[in-house]
Amino acid sequence: MKLQFLNIALSFDHLKHPLTKPTGKAVKSTKMWKAALTGLLYVALLPLGLFYLGAAAWKNRVVKEMSKPKGAAKKADIAAASLKSENKFLKRPEMEVIGEFIDFLSDKLGQEGIFRVPGSASKMKEMQSKGKIVAGSTVNDVASVLKRYIKGLELIDVTARDAFLSTTAAGKSDEEKIKILKEVVNGLDNEKRELLKTLINFIGKVEENENNQMNAEALASMFTPNLIDTEDMDPIFAKKTAKDLNSATKFLIEHRDEIFAEAKPPPSELPKGSDKDRLESKTKERPAIQQKRRPPTRKKRPPPPKPTFM
């Protein structure tokens, strides 16, 4: 026992005086103490490391679960995952494709749950592979393919999305919201603006049908993820802002007439091609008519008096 305490003392003495050459027993004792302290340190840090790994795994699982769609949306996404093969609809003009979908669905707007009930995955895949509506397709099949097609168009990009989202700020009146959404719409290029206008007007007709049980709020929740680009958003932040984006889309559907109304020119400014414009162009083109100068008229002098003879 005394020998062991002596070895410990020698080891600490060596730490104080590193220049002195330690004995073999002192070196061995020092190594033992270092190993023991290292082991204790590992044992102390092990729970902390396990806790960190567990917390990271739990966070990843929560994010993954929160980003998963629920219910019918989950079935629709599972079906859409199998449709990532070649989509021949994308090789056709956008307005032509949208018009084909709208023509098919226009007389079937009373279908209950239209755009909410997912279609058949096999029919959707067949339509996308052929680039047209195939025989035997149901309303839900065509409506589901339409939603997926719209998502690929990215009608409202990241820049427009931020302005779009600003309409949900507290205290904004309807007039202010309409003004903001008008600026968003007018900021799009002509093709995207016409596509968005056509789609929103069609969605408005769906909302006006009382038989399908799809109001503006329900339709907004179905179309917002496809109209607005949210790919760059963090999944948790996207889930938090989903309600606000749905609210903005709902407002767009309900006030589509005011938002997409074309600006009228002031009364003093007539558009090109008007009567005033044509009159001015004719006046410019018509050469000035030069009047011939008439020589000045000279007054005739009275004849001299005839001489009289006496």
Image (cartoon, grey):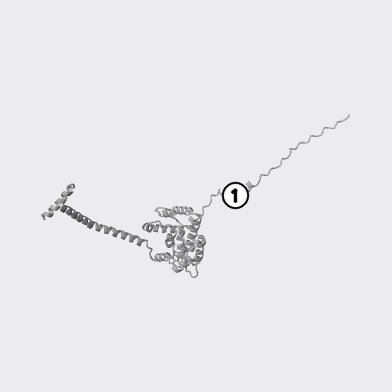
Q: Quadrant of the N terminus?
A: bottom left
Give the residue at the far left of this rendering.
2
Q: Quadrant of the C terminus?
A: top right
Give the residue at the far bottom of this rendering.
136
Expressed as whole percent of the image width and height from the top left, the position of residue 37 reads: 20, 55
Q: Secondary structure at mark 1?
A: helix
Amino acid at circle 1: Asp
Expressed as whole percent of the image width and height from the top left, the position of residue 24 reads: 16, 53
Given residues 79 and 274, the one toward you in this image is: 79
Is residue 281 visible in this depiction of the protein?
A: yes
Mark 1, residue position: 277
Is residue 120 visible in this depiction of the protein?
A: no
Give the residue at the far top of this rendering.
310
Expressed as whole percent of the image width and height from the top left, the position of residue 287 reads: 66, 45
Question: Residue at coordinates 14% horizontally, 53% vertically from top-left?
Answer: 7
Above or below, 293 against 9 in this view is above
Given residues 294 and 288, the one toward you in this image is: 288
Q: Using the rendered view, name the quadrant where residue 305 is placed.
A: top right
Expressed as whole percent of the image width and height from the top left, the position of residue 186 reads: 48, 53
Horizontal placement of 298 versus 123: left or right?
Answer: right
Give the residue at the far right of this rendering.
310
Horizontal placement of 170 versus 259: left or right?
Answer: left
